[in-house]
Image (tube, rainbow, N blue to C red):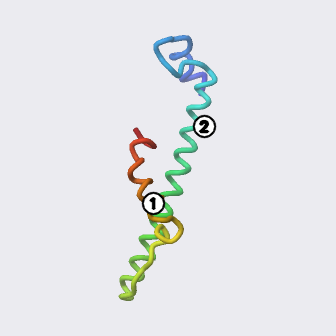
């Protein structure tokens, strides 16, 4: 990847990620973000599937999100959203 993308940015002081060590960190960060996003999507699909099954049986469904996180932590997740993703 360095062969294709590294040459354009190397040594340019106006580009903050122009160093070769930063180039690797960007790819590692992108991979980690992709893995977390994929996990989050699967968790949401799991919740939706079981919620719809419970609705079809006309039974109440208790979300796992509410069971393992207390109210204060859940609220901070949404209030701090701009901090995580500016």
In the rendered view of the protein, which quadrant contains the C terminus? top left
Q: Position of residue 12 (x, y in %)?
A: 51, 11
The picture quadrant where one finds residue 23 is top right
Q: CA distance from mark 1 to mark 2?
A: 31 Å
Which label number is shown at residue 28?
2
Q: Residue at x 57, y 20 (%)?
A: 6
Query: Total label count?
Result: 2
Q: Residue at x 62, y 21 (%)?
A: 20
Report crowding for label 1: few under 14, some 14 to 19, many 20 or more residues within 10 A (C-alpha).
Answer: few
Say which of 21 and 67 sits in front.
Answer: 67
Q: At which x and y percent is residue 28?
A: 60, 37
- Looking at the image, which is closer to me, 8 or 80? 80
Q: Residue furthest front?
A: 72
Residue at coordinates 60% horizontally, 22% vertically from top-left?
3
* Quarter of the image with the N terminus in it: top right
- Is residue 49 shown above or below 83? below
Mark 1 and mark 2 lie on one chain; the one further toward the N terminus is 2
Above or below for 14 versus 76: above
User: Tag 2, which secondary structure?
Assistant: helix
70 with respect to 20 (left or right): left
Taking 77 as reference, is 52 above or below it? below
Q: Around disc 2, counting alpha carbons within 10 Å, would you say few (fewer than 14), some (14 to 19), or many (20 or more)?
A: few
Camera-side residue of 13 and 38: 13
Q: Of tags 1 and 2, which is closer to the observer?
A: 1
Determine which residue is flagged by label 1: 72
* SS state under label 1: helix
Rendering coords of residue 17 (x, y %): 53, 22
> Measuring 44% from the left and 73% from the top, which residue is drawn there?
49
Q: Position of residue 32 (x, y in %)?
A: 57, 44
> Which of the labelled discs sits on residue 58, or is there none?
none
């Amino acid at each position: 990847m360095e062969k294709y993308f590294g040459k354009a940015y190397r040594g340019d002081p106006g580009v903050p990620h122009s160093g070769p060590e930063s180039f690797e960190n960007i790819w590692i960060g992108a991979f980690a973000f992709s893995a977390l996003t994929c996990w989050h999507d699967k968790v949401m699909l799991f919740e939706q599937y079981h919620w719809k099954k419970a609705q079809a049986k006309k039974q109440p469904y208790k979300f796992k999100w509410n069971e393992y996180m207390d109210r204060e932590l859940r609220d901070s997740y949404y209030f701090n959203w701009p901090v995580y993703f500016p």
